Amino acid sequence: MPAVLRLPVAVAPLLEDGFEAFLMECRLRGLSPATVRWYVVTVGPLLRHARSVGCERTDEVTEAHIRTFVADQQTRVQASRVNQYRKGLNAFFDWALTEGLVAVNPAARLRKLREPRKVIATFTEADLKRLLAQPDTNTFTGLRDHVLLLCLLDTGLRLSEALGLRLDDVTSTVSR
C-alpha cells in the first residue's frame, strides 16, 4: 500500500482554503451537487463565526469555538437544524483530520440534540367516511379518484408515489 502524504498540522491552510479543498474532495468522490451545497450551508456559518473570533487557519478552530457557535444557533434555529450543523462540521473536521490538517476533530465530542417528536394528526373514522364519500363513483373520474384515495389510505403511499405508479409496478395475486 502506498504511503499517504500528510502535511504537518503546523502548515494547516486558511479556513476558506481548507473548506474549498474539502468541497473539491466531495465533488471528486462523486457526491451530488445538492450534497455539496448542503456542506456549504452547514459548515459555512461556523467558518464565518470562527473568523469573527479570530480563527484564520483550520487548526485554530477549537471545541470551545464550535460549542459557542452551537449554543448561539440553539437560540436561533430548531434542534434539527443544529443537528445538521453538527453533522456537517463533524464530516468536515473528520476529513481535515484524515488529511493531517488538524491534530484532533474539534466537533467529535458534540452530541446530537434531542429533537421534539412531531405527532402527526390522523384521520378519524368520520373524517375517512366523509373523504371517501366525496367522489361520485358513478362517473369514471369519480371512481378513479375513489380508488386512488383507497390506494393512498391502504398503502400509506405519498401522492407523488401513487401518481408515479405504472402497471408493471403492481403485482396481483388474482389471475387474469
Image (cartoon, helix red, strand yellow):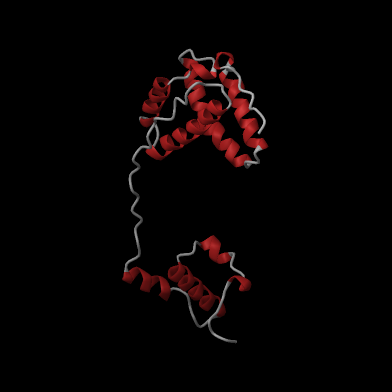
Image quarter hosting the N terminus:
top right
Residue at image location 62% in from the left, 70% down from the top: 166
Residue 57 position, x and y percent, is 54, 16
Horizontal arrangement in the rendering, residue 114 relative to residue 100 (left or right): left
Residue farthest to the front?
1
- Picture quarter containing residue 95? top right
Residue at image location 51% in from the left, 71% down from the top: 148
Residue 28 position, x and y percent, is 67, 36
Residue 74 vs 144, above or below: the answer is: above
Q: In front: 29, or 137?
A: 29
Residue 158 vs 59, above or below: the answer is: below
Residue at image location 50% in from the left, 75% down from the top: 147
Q: In front: 26, or 137?
A: 26
Residue 76 vs 175, above or below: the answer is: above
Residue at image location 60% in from the left, 41% down from the top: 34
Residue 124 vs 1, above or below: the answer is: below
Image quarter hosting the C terminus:
bottom right
- Picture quarter containing residue 99? top right
Residue 118 position, x and y percent, is 35, 50
